[in-house]
Structures are given as C-alpha cells and as structure tokens.
Image: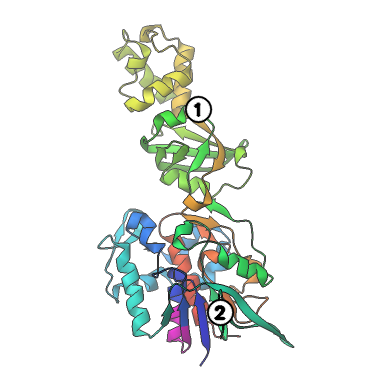
Amino acid sequence: MKKTAIIGGGPAGMSAAIAALRSGQQADLYDQNEKLGKKLYITGKGRCNLTNHCDISEFFDSIVTNKNFLYSALYTFTNDALMDLMEENGCPLKIERGERVFPKSDKSSDVIKAYRKILERERAQVFLNQRIAAVETAKSSEGVKVTGVRFENGRIENYDRVILATGGRSYISTGSDGSGFKMARDLGHRVTPLRPSLVGVNTQEAWVPELQGLSLRNVGLTMKQGRKKIRHEAGEMLFTHFGVSGPLVLTMSAFMKPPYEDYTLTIDLKPALSMEQMDVRLQRDFEKYHNKHFINGLVDLLPSKMIPVMVKCSGIPEDKRVNQITREERRHLAELFKGLALHVTSLQDINTAIITSGGVDVKEIDPSTMESKLVRGLYFAGEMIDVDALTGGFNIQIAASTGWLAGLSEEG
C-alpha cells in the first residue's frame, strides 16, 4: 500500500486525502493549525460559497489564469460531484443568485464537519499543529523522487507520495503563510510572482475617503489600462477609507497586474441612461429645482453623501442657482454621471485578499495528474498552483478538484 502525505488541511488537502483513501492508499493529513479548514471558516463571510452550480463547461469563463490547465481536474471531480459529496455527508446545500452554492444552514462549519466525517469514516490519519519543514527526495537513475517529509524538529517520516496543498499567501492567520512555495522552490520549481487577487483597490482621488461606507448598486464599472478598455461589469461597489471595494471591484482586481498605476476605473452612475438621456434627466431635475442652490438640485439623482463630492468634481459653485447653470456646465455634469474616474495607485495588501494569484508554474506540473514534472511522487493542489478565478465559488471548486486529482494519482 502506497503511503501518501498531504500537507495542508484546506479543501484541496482534505479532498486529496479522501481521494487517496478511496484509491487504496494510506493517507496522512498534516496541518499546522489547531483544526482543519481554518480558512474555510471565514470564506463567504462565514457562509462558505462552496462552488458554483453552472454547467461545468461554463466554469472556464470565470477562470482568470491558466484555465486550460484545469480541464482534467474539473472534469474528474466536478461541481456536481462536490455537491453530492457534501449532501451525502450531512451538509444540505442551496443555490443562490449567480448559481452560487452555500450550505442551507449558512454555516461554513457544516462544510468542514462533512469533510471531517468522511475523513474519519475512511480512516485518514489527521495530524494537527504539525509544521513540515521540507520534502525529502533522493536521486536515482530515473531522476529525483520523493522519499518523505522532514518536520521542524528534524524528524523524518517516509512516504511514497507527497501532496503540497498549503494554500496561498492571503489571510496569514489561517496558516496561508507561503511555506509551501518555499518547499516548491527548494525542490527546483519556479513560483510565478505572488500578488493579491479579489481584493480592494487603492485610489488616488482625495475625495474618495469622504464616501467611506457608501455602497452603490446597479452601477457600471469600466477598467482601462492606459487608453485600452480591459473590462466592463455592472453591479455593486463600495467606497472605503483607502479606495473602492465590493463585488465589482474585486472582479476588476483579478485582471490587474503591476504596474497598477496604469489602471483607471470609471463609474457609470446611471447605466440605464445614454448620455443624451442623462442630459434630458438633468434638465428635468433642474427645472424642478430651478430656484434652489446647485447643491440642493441633485437630491433625486444621488445618495446624499455623494452630492457634495459630485458638486466638487463638477467645478460648479455649490451656491450657484440651478437656473443659472450653463448648458456647458450641465453637459460636463452629465459626463461625470456617466464616467466618474478613479485612478488606481495599488491593490490592498495580499493578506487582505480573498485569494493569491501566482504560484507553482503550471508548465512544471502534469495537468492530468497534478504531479511535478521535476520530482516524481510530488503533487500540487489548490492555491499552490498558478491558477485563479473570479468570486462565485470557483476557487474552492478548483482547490477541491485539483486536490482530488492529486489524491487519485498513484503514479510515481
């Protein structure tokens, strides 16, 4: 019987352990935390958006980096397979807007309980509060091969296979401290630059902090790199003390690469109106409030918190009578409503990001097994790999699918 060590107790590691056990291996699961699935507890604001119920063929539309690498993994262990695994083990699920899948209880702990239940039933050996320092290897005529793992205290345990599933570098408090990347580098693997993804964006404009806490719904957001339009989305966003966040902004951040100063985000506050319709709407409101000061003429168009900012951006004196505003001033205001620009300075710190972009170079991993092309018996899963996706349950599914495939693979 092959002995497999899985390092990391997140969805990738737990899925790998289950698949290894079911394919007749001895599976020892190691995690440096005091409990399994520590990062899962906080995902989806504690609700755990486990996967997405879209057709598996549509999954790839939401994968940002190296989507072709994931075909074998996602078709071997699909979203339906993950949902079945949960529901068969005491975690009923529900499907919400955007095909997002959550536990019916809205408790991420129920997902972890289901994983633990399977691991106990399949008799996995789970070792918590264990820090692995390195993967041991030996050279032979057939190349470099895994021989075991070395613990921080120097103890060595022999294994036929090792699966690295230690996560990325976001939310360090949950154990995602980047230790797996060091192990991969020590074994000769290239790790592509690690950067935050699905994260808030820092912006240049001095007026942004004045809107801290303001959420905008049903707005359009366009991202440009220089003059080139990169992406357009519609939905919800949030102003913060540092810049902007919320669903639209998190999505945009996934497509940003350094230098971040090249990017501009433009908000369309009234996406249902064309520029001409916006101008007509302003004329109507100005007629209604024609004797009022300009600052009091926008009450039907904007949240109260945003009115002073728009007045400032327009350059029109706040105490100017609405009936004295010129056609040129009104047209400029309409342009602001249709394109309020934010200049990006940087992304928020990687420790606040939902996921890490970057990781072990996919060119050095066999996509049909998740085995290293450099070291026989070494496998990678989850955020260790240079793959990432948008919000909506896609990243946890990628973790589970790559973990499952790595666990199944008995080559080496």
Question: Looking at the picture, how far across and down is residue 245, in whole percent?
Answer: 44, 42
Quadrant in the picture for the C terminus: bottom right
Please give the range of residues in magenta: 17-27
Please state if 40 lies on the left or on the right of 226 as rendered. left
Question: Looking at the picture, how far across and down is residue 18, in whole percent?
Answer: 42, 80
Q: Secondary structure at mark 1?
A: loop
Residue 32 versus residue 176: which sits nearer the camera? 32
203 part of magenta stretch: no
- Earlier along the polypeptide chain: callout 2 or callout 1? 2
Q: Height in image: 262 above or below 144?
A: above
Structural distance between the alpha carbons of marks 2 and 1 = 50 Å
Residue highlighted by disc 2: 162
Residue 55 versus residue 318: which sits nearer the camera? 318
Residue 395 versus residue 378: which sits nearer the camera? 378
Question: Looking at the picture, how far across and down is residue 195, in whole percent?
Answer: 57, 53
Residue highlighted by disc 1: 206
22 part of magenta stretch: yes
Query: Which picture quadrant has residue 80?
Result: bottom left
Question: Looking at the picture, how far across and down is residue 375, in whole percent?
Answer: 66, 78
Q: Which mark is residue 186?
A: none
- Dot 1 alpha-carbon crowd within 10 angstroms: few under 14, some 14 to 19, many 20 or more: few
Amino acid of disc 1:
Ala
